Amino acid sequence: MKQKLIRITSVPQSLGGLLKGQMKFMSQYYDIIGISSNGDGQLEEFAVIENIKTIPVEMTRKITPFKDIVAVYKLYKIFKKEQPFIVHTHTPKAGTLGMLAAKLAGVPNRLHTIAGLPLVEARGLKRVLLNLVEKITYSCATIIYPNSIGLKKIILEHQFTKPEKLKVLANGSSNGIDTSYYNPQLVTNNEKTILQEELGIKPSDFVFVFVGRLVTDKGINELVEAFINLNMQIPHIKLLLVGAFEDKLDPLSSQTINLINENKNILHVGWQDDVRPYFAISNCLVFPSYREGFPNVVLQAGAMKLPCIVTNINGCNEIISEPDNGIIIPVKNTEAIYQSMERLIQMSKKDHETMGEISRNTIVSKFEQRFVWKSILEEYQKIGTINLN
């Protein structure tokens, strides 16, 4: 009989996106239950895709004390009934609620993966509250897995927990990347030509691409300003924005939104289920984020043979090595974005190709999905062996 393993995220998009394929892989070895908010039926869809059992528990991404207490109680009841060997949480709210409920229910192995720290950009009373919540999460967990080396350092600097509780699996990342899927050879020249014509991109254009949520802490305000300044000097460039605006959580400035909507060389295509064609028609990823855990977008772009301009933050600076496969710049620095974009344009085609090859080779050798999955599986099995002894 397989041991029972429960994995929890706040919303089903995280289960289905951040951990895509991992549940199905783990179900060969464990009896898996996935828990998150239902999300208009998305949790059921995820259950079918991953072929696992799921249980909906409503969790919010905001500070909602009453709803949080209700969620803790529901999780506690589930844990007491299911008697899992491991509860493994992801995302901040699911981590706090899941770890607290698991400790109250007497779950022996309480694991939490950290994929980013929103509190890094918080200030004042909100920062104090988030620090407290983080410490509660860590105190309830038996092991904490930062998904990057840099994130582990930040956690230790803030003294959220003891060093012996922290462990980075594989080379970082929560789920790795499927490099057989993110492969530039899978996008045909004909597909690229059609997409370029639809977007009005000429063969002579140099295309910078950003993929992700269009919010302030992704550095979009600075990116748009830098691009417009550069576009005044170099006409044959385009900025391709792949992602959706967020009106409530961390929205862009109204000035930036107006510039995106009005500038004909800024191409906003919204959310895309398949980003590979957009990487394939681009020359360089620009990812000026303020904070990350371990950014999947940089892994995806690297696997698609793109040089990357990234900020000097954890995760990004563990994937990109300057000058081998990209450029590393300071956070919140419009001038640095401008200069690095200008530098990329001035490089030769051969240099671009070399950087692209190094990017893909780095991702394949260090962050291939199956390698990450096996590292997590080995950790579970090691925990099981310790418990048996």
Image (tube, grey):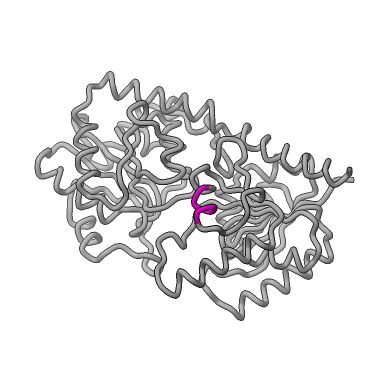
Residue drawn at x 41%, y 24% is 358
Residue drawn at x 36%, y 39% is 278
- Name the side, left or right, on which 86 lies relative to 286: right
Report if residue 103 lies within the magenta region.
Answer: no
Quadrant location of the N terminus in the rendered image: top right
Image: 160 above or below 278 = below
Q: Position of residue 162 (x, y in %)?
A: 63, 54
Residue drawn at x 27%, y 39% is 208
Give the magenta-colored segment's residue range.
153-157
- Name the side, left or right, on which 58 lies relative to 383: left
Quarter residue 381 falls in: top right
Figure label count: 0
Q: Position of residue 351 (x, y in %)?
A: 28, 21
Quadrant location of the C terminus in the rendered image: top right
Residue found at the far left of this picture: 233
Can residue 225 be seen at all in this image of the molecule?
A: yes
- Name the side, left or right, on which 182 lies relative to 56: left
Can residue 33 be seen at all in this image of the molecule?
A: no
Q: Position of residue 223 (x, y in %)?
A: 26, 50
Q: Position of residue 45 (x, y in %)?
A: 63, 55
Image: 325 above or below 263 = above
Quarter residue 308 falls in: top left
Residue drawn at x 26%, y 56% is 221
- Most foreground residue, 342 or 161: 161
Residue found at the far bottom of this picture: 66
- Most foreground residue, 43 or 97: 97
Decide whether the magenta segment is chiefly helix, strand or loop: helix
